[in-house]
Image: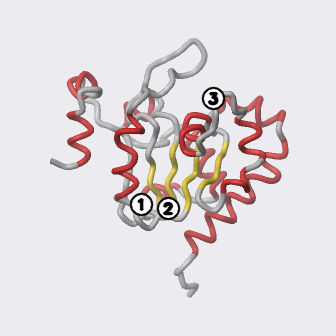
Amino acid sequence: MSLFEEIKADPMNQSLTKQGLDPIYAAPKTAKIIIIGQAPGRKVQETGIMFNDASGDRLREWMGISKDEFYRSGDIGVVPMDFYYPGKAKSGDKAPRKGIADKWHPRLLEQMPDRQLIILVGSYAQKKYLDLPSSAKITDTIRNFEDYLPEYFPIVHPSPRNNIWLSRNPWYERDVIPALQKRVKEILGAGKTID
């Protein structure tokens, strides 16, 4: 049984599988950069295409890469904290379900041995992978992004819901995004020759 089929058969996911829903992730063996985010949004779950929304457009812009590079190069892996849309909450989407990342991420990451960078999108991924206390403030984590390099690069979620945060923290687009683009370019440009 493939890992994809194992995830679908997981008792935690059986009701979703019965609805005809597939887990949303990408783990190409050639991935150099892995994005660990929250969970698919409703539109992403409906289309089955990761970051196929306004958040994805902004994420690609922040990374400085094209849609083609994102989806077809084999350089990018996407492993969310939950593989399924968790549903609507009062403000935004519900939190990813607990236990999914602990159970499946190690095996998915093992499939991508060439990874050089893990971009941690939002507080759920950052708290897990940076071993932060629940009281940790995302603004402080992102402001101190250099502390987590070269393995991890924490960023704010690219959702339009974070426009207010972005306007209050101009240092993010001034300092953090150029550093992210530089690192992505270094990794994806390595080994490519210019004609």
Amino acid under disc 2: Glu
Image coords of residue 134 (percent x, y): 63, 29
Amino acid under disc 1: Arg
Amino acid under disc 3: Ser
Q: Using the image, determine if residue 100 lies above or below residue 72.
A: above
Q: Earlier in the sequence, mark 3 or mark 2?
A: 2
Residue picked out by circle 1: 72
Secondary structure state at the residue bearing disc 1: helix
Residue 134 is labelled as 3
Q: Quadrant of the C terminus?
A: bottom right
Left or right of 75, for residue 58 = right
Give the residue at x 66% y 54%.
Answer: 148
| Closest to the observer, 20 or 148 | 148
Marks 2/1 in contact by CB < 8 Å: the verdict is yes
Q: Using the image, determine if residue 189 lies above or below residue 158.
A: below
Q: Quadrant of residue 101?
A: top left
Q: Using the image, determine if residue 18 lies above or below residue 59.
A: above
Q: Earlier in the sequence, mark 1 or mark 3?
A: 1
- Badge 3: residue crowd in 10 Å (few <14, some 14–19, many ≥20): few
Give the residue at x 75% y 37%.
Answer: 139
Of labels 3 and 2, the one closer to you: 3
